[in-house]
């Protein structure tokens, strides 16, 4: 990089300063790439720590449509869950949606994708399932050679994903209503305490 600075300074006079401008542009691009790589590394660490290496458990909690007379082996469940985690690492918007889903079902300090996925399965599929279904559909569409998804019924999965997307657009995804009620009560108590002070 220092050589480019020297070249830019030497060429500054004949290029009327454009070489210095080009050096600043190149420097900015390099810094922005480094920042993006650092953000991706932080996102990877946070997602990896949530799963704690138990990708198969998460995969099985997703309530995926399975083809008739087929089953998902433990190895395929582990690989499938790992692929979902990688997809979330590389897609920031999906990772944000996934975290919002976990935040709805878990306490602030303790984020557990397993409890959240299980609660969503019992109370109506929502953000966690939507992010995971999008990941699996994208992986199955773009990588036909992934054997870990061979037992999944692609048509029914796309149908379920589309239904969840329509609910998300309409704002009718199931929510943790008890948690929302408790949050509203807490906010009301805090506001009342502030007004009294």
Image (cartoon, rainbow, N blue to C red):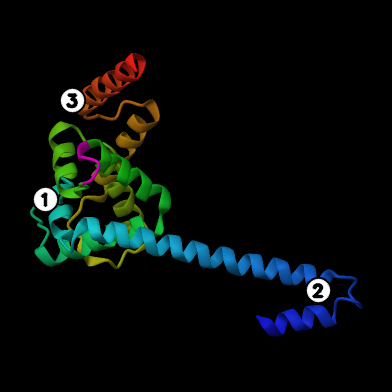
**Which residue does the image show at 86% across and 70% down from the upper left?**
17
Real-space Cα separation, disc 2 to disc 3, in angstroms: 61 Å
* Residue to which mark 2 is pinned: 19
Q: Residues within 10 Å of mark 1 (few under 14, many from 20)?
A: few
* Residue to which mark 1 is pinned: 68
Q: Nearer the viewer, residue 142 or 114?
A: 114
Lower position in the chain sequence, tag 3 or tag 1: 1
Residue 136, percent across and down?
29, 54
Was residue 5 drawn as part of the magenta stretch in this picture? no
| Horizontal side of residue 113 vs 164, given as left or right | left
Real-space Cα separation, disc 2 to disc 1, in angstroms: 65 Å
Lower position in the chain sequence, tag 2 or tag 3: 2
| Horizontal side of residue 14 vs 165, given as left or right | right
Q: Nearer the viewer, residue 49 or 73?
A: 49
Disc 3, SS: helix
**Which residue does the image show at 33% across and 48% down from the upper left?**
134
Q: Residues within 10 Å of mark 3 (few under 14, many from 20)?
A: few
């Amino acid at each position: 990089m220092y050589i480019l600075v020297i070249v830019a300074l030497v060429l500054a006079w004949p290029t009327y300063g454009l070489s210095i401008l080009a050096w600043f542009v190149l420097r900015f691009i390099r810094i922005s790439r480094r920042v993006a790589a650092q953000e991706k590394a932080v996102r990877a660490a946070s997602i990896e720590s949530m799963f704690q290496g138990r990708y198969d458990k998460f995969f099985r909690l997703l309530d995926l449509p399975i083809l008739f007379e087929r089953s998902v082996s433990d190895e395929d469940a582990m690989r499938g869950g790992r692929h979902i985690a990688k997809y979330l690492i590389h897609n920031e918007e999906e990772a944000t949606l996934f975290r919002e889903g976990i935040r709805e079902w878990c306490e602030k300090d303790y984020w557990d994708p397993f409890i959240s996925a299980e609660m969503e399965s019992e109370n109506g599929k929502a953000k966690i399932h939507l992010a995971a279904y999008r990941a699996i559909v994208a992986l199955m569409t773009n990588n036909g050679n992934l054997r870990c998804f061979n037992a999944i019924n692609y048509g029914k999965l796309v149908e379920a994903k589309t239904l969840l997307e329509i609910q998300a657009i309409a704002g009718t995804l199931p929510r943790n209503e008890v948690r929302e009620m408790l949050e509203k009560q807490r906010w009301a108590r805090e506001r009342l305490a502030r007004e009294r002070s």
